[in-house]
Image (spheres, helix red, strand yellow):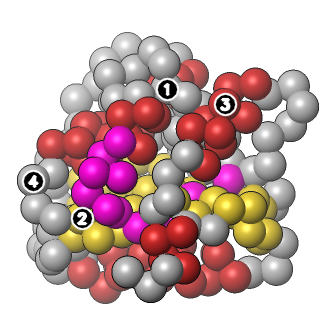
Amino acid sequence: MSVKPTRSLTGIQLITNRPVDQFLHRLAATQSPISHLVIISPFIGPLNHVRFKLERLVKKIDDSKIITYVITNEPPPNSPNHSEAINILSGSRFIEIRYNESLHAKVYVCQGNGAGFAMLGSGNLTDTSINQKIEVGVLINERGGTGPLFQELYRWGTERLRTVRGSKIVKRAEYIQSGR
């Protein structure tokens, strides 16, 4: 089932067709410098069956030196895809990974120089969510009068959720630690 996204309303757009895939596509197409990326998803997969694989995302993060915060659930023993995704993400010195077993939210934030965007919705960062499930997302542009909402989502992911009780650090980003 393919449903076209609704029109943008002053920097906010409802996405009813593969919202996570559309966020990743926009991230891949972004030409302006990106300083931070926030990925909040209880489940993450290697994205082997979508157009923007997780390895490609990590390459973009590394090539562009994007400080990235990933908050997810600890992979259960019966979830090889989630474990594989954590291994792929762990290979980047720009990525910090935290586990929080209370996590159910799905939020993605791309912070750039005044051209950031964020999406919150129902979709995990997995092949199943992108290819098989009916998901919905709200895309919020930093511009267009939505700057305060965008900034609050960014702060929630980078400050509050990272430090809330129950969030435990699994891998620190070496790039942040070295102060570069």
Is residue 82 depicted above or below 114 in this figure? above
Q: Nearer the viewer, residue 59 or 163?
A: 59
Q: Which residue is mark 3?
A: 84
- Give the mark, 3 or 2, whose residue is nearer the N terminus: 2
Dot label at residue 47: 1
- Give the mark, 4 or 1, whose residue is nearer the N terminus: 4
Is residue 104 depicted above or below 1 in this figure? below
Q: Which residue is mark 4?
A: 31
Q: Which residue is mark 2?
A: 34
Q: Is residue 62 visible?
A: yes
Q: CA distance from mark 3 to mark 1?
A: 10 Å
Q: CA distance from mark 4 to mark 3?
A: 29 Å
Mark 3, Cα crowd under 10 Å, few <14 / some 14-19 / many 20+, is some
Q: Secondary structure at mark 2?
A: strand
Horizontally, residue 173 falls left or right of residue 139, namely: right
Q: Position of residue 143 (x, y in %)?
A: 14, 74
- The image quadrant where one finds the N terminus is top left
60 is within the stretch colored magenta: yes
Q: Position of residue 49 (x, y in %)?
A: 45, 15
Residue reaching furthest to the right: 77
Mark 2, Cα crowd under 10 Å, few <14 / some 14-19 / many 20+, is many
What amino acid is at disc 1?
Leu
What amino acid is at disc 3?
Glu
Q: CA distance from mark 3 to mark 2?
A: 26 Å
